[in-house]
Amino acid sequence: MPEISRTARPKVPNPKVVVTRELADTVMERMEALFDTTNTRGDAAMTRDQLAAAMADCDVLVPTVTDDIDTALIEGAGPRLKLIANYGAGVNHIDLKAARARGIIVTNTPGVLTEDTADMTMALILSVPRRLAEGEKLVRSGEWKGWSPGGMLGHRIGGKALGIVGMGRIGQAVALRARAFGLTIHYHNRHRLPAVREAQLAATWHESLDDMLAAIDILTIHTPLNADSRDMIDARRIALLRRHVYLINASRGGIVDEDALVAALEAGKLAGAGLDVWKHEPRIDPRLLALPNVVMLPHMGSATFEGRIATGDKVIQNIRTWADGHRPPDQVLEGWV
């Protein structure tokens, strides 16, 4: 099995780069100026055949979350392909083991979307208990009869306990926002934060996820999707949540068992949910569409102009560093050992 060298490598002058989705104009223009770049125009994902053709004759592939770069595609790639510079932080759509076996480096773009995703998470935390989506639909329907003491009652979030699964960059950014709204912070993470950081966030660590789930009022998920986290929030764990709890997911759809979530919501065993990600995107379970207490968004947590450009800048930095013969700053190493 080829090893990924951590030292300088031969330079790759003017690498041939294929970008699988249409990106921001400024990003595509810069890539074309710096590299021998083929940009995809038109907002549609490549087919599997198109991906295979691109990977057969390029030095660098720039995929997105909509591209399933599996074992077969990587094994069929041409000998030139030595870098997969992912446009986005998550890499669960790329077979990292197969890439390593072929000596292909994988990079991602961590950090640039932290604030945007945290903002959207906070919006969902506010929207679901306060029934904002229901209220907006009521106004648009023309059926609103005006203010009344019992109209559109929801729940305040101040004083409630927020449980965060995954306390990385995004989880911590959510905690900072949530504190300003008067929420108390609880978290479950593989590793406990340093005491100084816990004090800054006024956060309580729960070594046991199950114990935390039984003690909170709102649950928000910010952990990567991998073998350990797939269906982490399953029927058993959903049953640990109290009936008044709201579940928020702006991470990855596969972390929550959607069938179990639907069953709990339909049975009134959860108060509601705010979802920006889906298990089978873009297909959404019609049972969720029918539930009024679910706020649904089209995977737009990171969708800001600033974030998209910053992501492109990260991709370019990784390609330039690799092409100059050095280790890219955002090389993905986790799970490669």
Image (tube, helix red, strand yellow):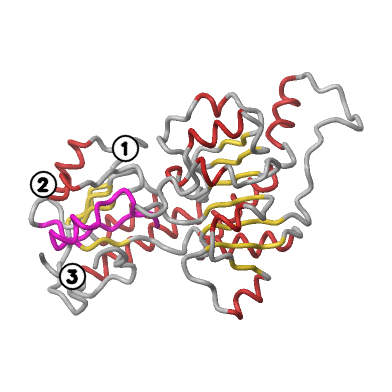
Disc nearer the start of the sequence (2/1): 1
Q: Nearer the viewer, residue 121 or 51?
A: 121
User: Badge 3: few (under 14), some or many (20 or more) residues near its Cα, within 10 Å?
Assistant: some
Q: CA distance from mark 1 to mark 3?
A: 29 Å
User: Badge 1: few (under 14), some or many (20 or more) residues near its Cα, within 10 Å?
Assistant: some
Q: Is residue 249 above or below residue 272?
A: below
Give the magenta range: 80-104
Q: Which residue is mark 2?
A: 76
Q: Residue at x 9, y 51 (%)?
A: 78
Q: Which residue is mark 3?
A: 4
Which amino acid does the dot numbered 1 rest on?
A: Ala
User: Badge 2: few (under 14), some or many (20 or more) residues near its Cα, within 10 Å?
Assistant: few
Q: Main SS of the magenta segment?
A: loop
**In the image, which is nearer the foreground, mark 1 or mark 3?**
3
**Which quadrant of the figure contains the N terminus?**
bottom left
Numbered tag placed on residue 45 in the rendering: 1
- Give the x, y percent position of residue 143: 78, 19
Which amino acid does the dot numbered 3 rest on?
A: Ile
Queried whether the magenta region covers residue 101, the answer comes back as yes
Task: Indicate the secondary structure of the residue bearing disc 3.
Answer: loop
Q: Is residue 188 above or below residue 244?
A: below
Q: Nearer the viewer, residue 203 or 5?
A: 203
Queried whether the magenta region covers residue 152, the answer comes back as no
Q: Is residue 127 above or below residue 207?
A: above
